[in-house]
Image (tube, rainbow, N blue to C red):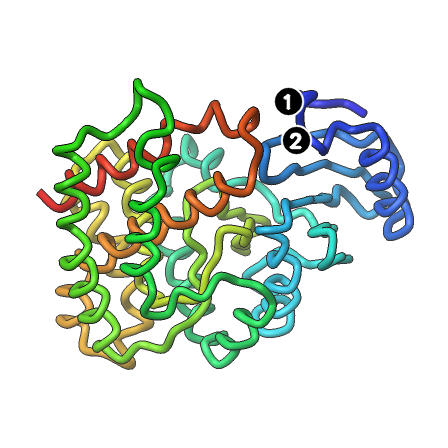
Amino acid sequence: MASSETNTALAWNDPHWLAEATAWIDANVERTGELDRFHSYPWATAIRAPTAAGIVWFKACIAELAHEVSTLELLNVRRPDAVPGLLAGDRERGWMLLEDAGERMRELEPLGGQLERWETAVRLYAKLQLDVAPAADRFAAGGVPDRRGRVAEGFRAVLGDERATKPTSESALTDEELERIHAVVPRLADAEQELDELGLPYTIQHDDLHDANVFVRDGDYRIIDWGDACVANPLLSLTVALAVVAYRFGVEDDAPEVARVQAAYLEPFAALVPAAELERAAPLARLVGYACGTIKWHEVMSAISGEQRAPFDVELPERLRRMLELCG
């Protein structure tokens, strides 16, 4: 097997695991060439498999993210135009075979027109959220974390874990920082309640909507990598998307480029809530969304071994410090 990234400590690199995964791939598609490891992380791996019909992708996740299989099953039924086609799935093992979705939007950036691509992508995604909202309970039943009105509660639990706040002496939050971050929780709870009072339906919330998870093929857009998803207020998805737009364009959070993408995302929701109310709620959504993503990171880090977790130990304290910056 060719490999772009190697970490021999990972389960994905165990010869018995690789043999079993290869047999499963070959049982579901007619492979025409060597498998190629695209990436390998402690929480998931992705492998290219060439077939006569083109490239397909094998993905495997840890148990805590295995709900991606059932999530894609539901999304393929309700919005097959917006997600990669699921060729085969094994819910118990967190394995899936996916059709190739095209080119990552990130790689298209040098071609120009990236702002328009972002607007198209977020409109598509917002409409998907609305279309699948009636299936919110089904997503949760399939294992997607249920954060409906529970983000502040989950964030408080993160703060109670010293492995999150003080994983190493170098990255540990100071006592003063800990006191300040605990003081954020009531504000977070108020923001969450205000968001929910908008009356938007709870739905799937991708929680990692960046330009490497949006693909374009022949003008069609596909949103991939749903393992980080949760069931929550839809607007929490603004957090990652707008932060990445600001970063890619090298602008501040309130720049016109960011405002355009935010407006494109909010547009489909204006059928349910006045646009002015949505715009006022957007900063609250970004704050609650950041806390939501921190809970996700904590859950993933808690699920992997100490040896595999060590390179990522700094992530949670840094996220908490960023939360303090967001709160001023």
**Circles 1, 2 touching at the beta carbon (< 8 Å):** yes
Mark 1 lies on a secondary structure that is loop
- Residue drawn at the location 38% of the way across and 73% of the way down: 202
Find residue 244 and report its horizontal and vertical position in percent: 33, 40
Q: Amino acid at mark 2?
A: Phe
Q: Is residue 219 visible?
A: no
The residue identified by callout 2 is 38
Find residue 238 and report its horizontal and vertical position in percent: 30, 55
Q: Is residue 287 above or below residue 7?
A: below
Could you tell me how far apart the alpha carbons at marks 1 and 2 are, in whole angstroms? 7 Å
Q: Is residue 37 left or right of residue 39?
A: right
Q: Is residue 306 above or below residue 277?
A: above
The residue identified by callout 1 is 5
- Density class for disc 2 (Cα within 10 Å; few <14, some 14-19, many ≥20) is some
- Residue drawn at the location 31% of the way across and 35% of the way down: 165
Mark 2 lies on a secondary structure that is strand
Find residue 258 and report its horizontal and vertical position in percent: 23, 47
Q: Nearer the viewer, residue 193 or 116?
A: 193
Q: Nearer the viewer, residue 67 or 209?
A: 67
